Amino acid sequence: MSKDQHKLRASIFVDANVLIGAFRGMKADVAAMEYLNRLPQIRLYTSGLAIAQCIATCQIKGDKERRLKLTQWVKQIIGRFSIISCTGKDIERSLDMTQPDMEDNIQYIMGNRMGCTHYVTNNKKDFAFVNAVIIPANKIRLIGA
């Protein structure tokens, strides 16, 4: 294993920006989701907050075709991922953190609560947490099998 390759861990959190990018057909995000789905031995997590962000960002009100596509996408996520609910304690704990992106702090707290050791995100700088391995979607293969 190269020094850049990370040992596979059981629990991986996927951030909203990767879900959104994959829905929109962004090549690296689509490839990341496909790769993670081929690793049945890992546990995939995302949050209800991330799914809500994906829906809010990707929906086009009144566009029935888009709604159907988005509904199918969210059902795929729900079928493969464990969905973490956000609690008041999660929000309180995130407010004490020094990282500037408050929303990503909440995502981290939720993932950490579930034992996630890897976070797949395109905003690596916003996930500068000491005890987490942060992997951008375009480097997903660094998660070794």
Image (spheres, grey):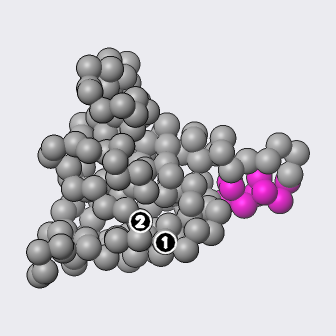
Q: Residue furthest bottom?
A: 1
Looking at the figure, which quarter contains the C terminus? bottom left
- Examine the structure image and report whether residue 71 is included in the region drawn in magenta: yes
Which residue is more in the foreground, 95 or 85? 95
Left or right: 6, with 29 as reference point: left
| Prevailing secondary structure class for the magenta stretch in the rendered image | helix
Q: Residue at x 88, y 45 (%)?
A: 62
Q: Tell me the number on the disc at residue 137.
A: 2
Residue 51 in percent (x, y) is at 54, 45
The picture quadrant where one finds residue 112 is top left
The picture quadrant where one finds residue 102 is top left
Q: Residue at x 21, y 61 (%)?
A: 10
- Residue 70, placed above or below residue 2: above
Look at mark 1 in the image and give the residue it sits on.
28
Tell me the SS state at disc 2.
helix
Which residue is more in the foreground, 137 or 36? 137
Q: Are marks 2 and 1 in contact (CB under 8 Å)?
A: yes
**Which circle's residue, 2 or 1, is located before the other in the chain?**
1
Tell me the SS state at disc 1.
helix
Q: Are there few (<14), some (14-19), or many (20+) residues within 10 Å of tag 2?
A: many
Residue type of the residue flagged with mark 2: Ala
User: Can residue 106 be seen in the rendering of this structure?
Assistant: no
Left or right: 145, with 32 as reference point: left
